[in-house]
Image: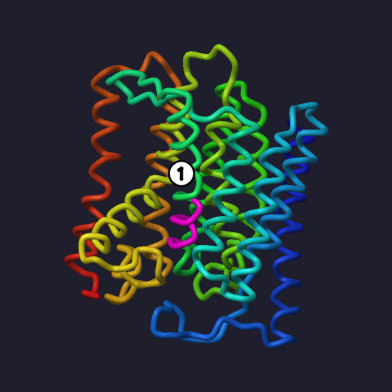
């Protein structure tokens, strides 16, 4: 564990210094994100620091796997690099959504074809539900593509995507420890360490933005972590997808609520907008840091619940209480956005 700690600390420092260097590089060349009608910032700010974070996270994961003699998911690395390249091209050239989508589907399909798709899902205190293999291939690919885009859309205010990555990464680190799943522990730790280095420079007021290369990479990584964590012949495998959803629960419910509302109004759900619940709160006068902390708190609570469910001896009443609190959190945020947020 000492070696793992050293590698993670190194990843944090390299990410912090690398993002700082990248910021200086973009400032010198005038590569800035200028505010527009859909922006949540008012001052031109460097963009693309997530590229450094993503590359550091992958390098740390590989290094940790080597020193820990753990299996390396090459399917994850190849697919993640494809996602990073697509995001980087979009950061630079503003690639048409359909072309991005095709590339994302290809990257997700490569990962799913080489790895095991979701075989089922476990709903605490309800039961396990198996998914037929062919349907699982389609559903898993669709979930990965959906979530990497949802994570990208949620990266709209200072700190929110970085803090979510730190919390979810820590969650998966401990899931890996409790579940004896080295890939989950090592990848989760790598994501958390690299994201923390970036978050320091992205906290309000942000000195640099993440960009699509970083946010899409994080979304992809957290979408596939339940699969990377699978263990042969384990009765707990079905719970991993549930944990994966709980680890990023605020991003899941915000993106779904916004998607449904815009879809019902006949709007183009893939186009840029400012209608997410967190954006409505910021438009209504809440600070980026306050909204980010609210989402971070919900994520920390729901992720903790996910880890608790790995313990098969959780009392029934306690489980119902935990599930109820988690499911009620979207209603709380929705109420806050309606009560205190601006109508957009």
Which residue sits at x=45%, y=43%?
A: 143
Q: Looking at this view, name the residue that lies furthest to the right.
A: 67
Residue 162 coordinates in the image, percent (x, y): 54, 58
Nearest the eye: 185 or 215: 215
Kindly identify which residue carries mark 1. 142
Considering the whole magenta stretch, tell me its main secondary structure.
helix
14 with respect to 161 (left or right): right
Q: In the rendered view, would you say 239 is above or below 4?
A: above
Task: Kindly state the secondary structure of the residue where label 1 is placed.
Answer: helix
Q: How is the image coloured?
A: rainbow
User: Magenta stretch containing residue 152, yes or no?
Assistant: yes
Q: Report the magenta residues as a range.
A: 148-154
Locate the C terminus and report the quarter of the image it occupies.
Answer: bottom left
Q: Quadrant of residue 99?
A: bottom right
Q: In the rendered view, would you say 160 is above or below 64?
A: below
Q: Quadrant of residue 47?
A: bottom right
Label 1 environment density (alpha carbons within 10 Å; few <14, some 14–19, many ≥20):
some
Residue 210 coordinates in the image, percent (x, y): 58, 66
Locate the N terminus and report the quarter of the image it occupies.
Answer: top right
Which residue sits at x=64%, y=75%?
A: 92
Which residue sits at x=28%, y=68%?
A: 267
Q: In the rendered view, would you say 108 is above or below 161?
A: above
Residue 146 coordinates in the image, percent (x, y): 44, 50
Residue 295 coordinates in the image, percent (x, y): 38, 55
User: Magenta stretch containing residue 285, yes or no?
Assistant: no
């Amino acid at each position: 564990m000492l070696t793992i700690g050293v590698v993670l600390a190194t990843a944090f420092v390299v990410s912090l210094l690398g993002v700082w260097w990248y910021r200086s590089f973009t400032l010198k060349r005038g590569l800035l994100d200028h505010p527009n009608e859909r922006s949540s910032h008012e001052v031109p700010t460097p963009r693309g620091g997530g590229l450094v974070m993503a590359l550091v996270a992958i390098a740390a994961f590989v290094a940790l796997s080597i020193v820990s003699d753990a299996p390396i998911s090459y399917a994850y690395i190849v697919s993640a690099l494809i996602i990073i390249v697509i995001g980087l091209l979009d950061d630079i050239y503003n690639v048409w959504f359909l072309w991005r989508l095709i590339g994302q589907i290809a990257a997700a399909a490569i990962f799913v074809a080489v790895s095991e798709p979701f075989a089922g899902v476990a709903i605490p205190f309800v039961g396990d539900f198996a998914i037929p293999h062919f349907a699982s291939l389609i559903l898993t690919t669709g979930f990965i593509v959906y979530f990497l885009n949802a994570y990208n859309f949620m990266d709209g205010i200072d700190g929110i995507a970085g803090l979510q990555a730190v919390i979810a990464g820590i969650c998966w680190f401990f899931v890996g420890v409790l579940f004896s799943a080295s890939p989950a522990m090592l990848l989760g730790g790598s994501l958390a360490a690299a994201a923390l280095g970036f978050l320091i420079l992205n906290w309000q007021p942000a000195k640099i933005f993440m960009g699509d290369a970083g946010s899409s990479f994080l979304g992809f990584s957290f979408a596939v972590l339940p699969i990377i964590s699978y263990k042969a012949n384990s009765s707990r495998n079905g719970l991993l997808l549930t944990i994966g959803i709980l680890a990023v629960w605020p991003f899941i419910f915000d993106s779904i609520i916004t998607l449904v509302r815009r879809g019902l109004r006949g709007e183009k759900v893939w186009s840029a907008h400012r209608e997410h619940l967190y954006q409505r709160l910021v438009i209504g006068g809440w600070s980026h840091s306050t909204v980010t902390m609210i989402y971070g708190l919900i994520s920390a609570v729901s992720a903790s619940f996910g880890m608790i469910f790995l313990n098969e001896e959780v009392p029934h009443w306690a489980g119902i209480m935990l599930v109820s609190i988690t499911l009620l959190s979207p209603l709380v945020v929705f109420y806050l956005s309606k009560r205190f947020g601006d109508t957009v």
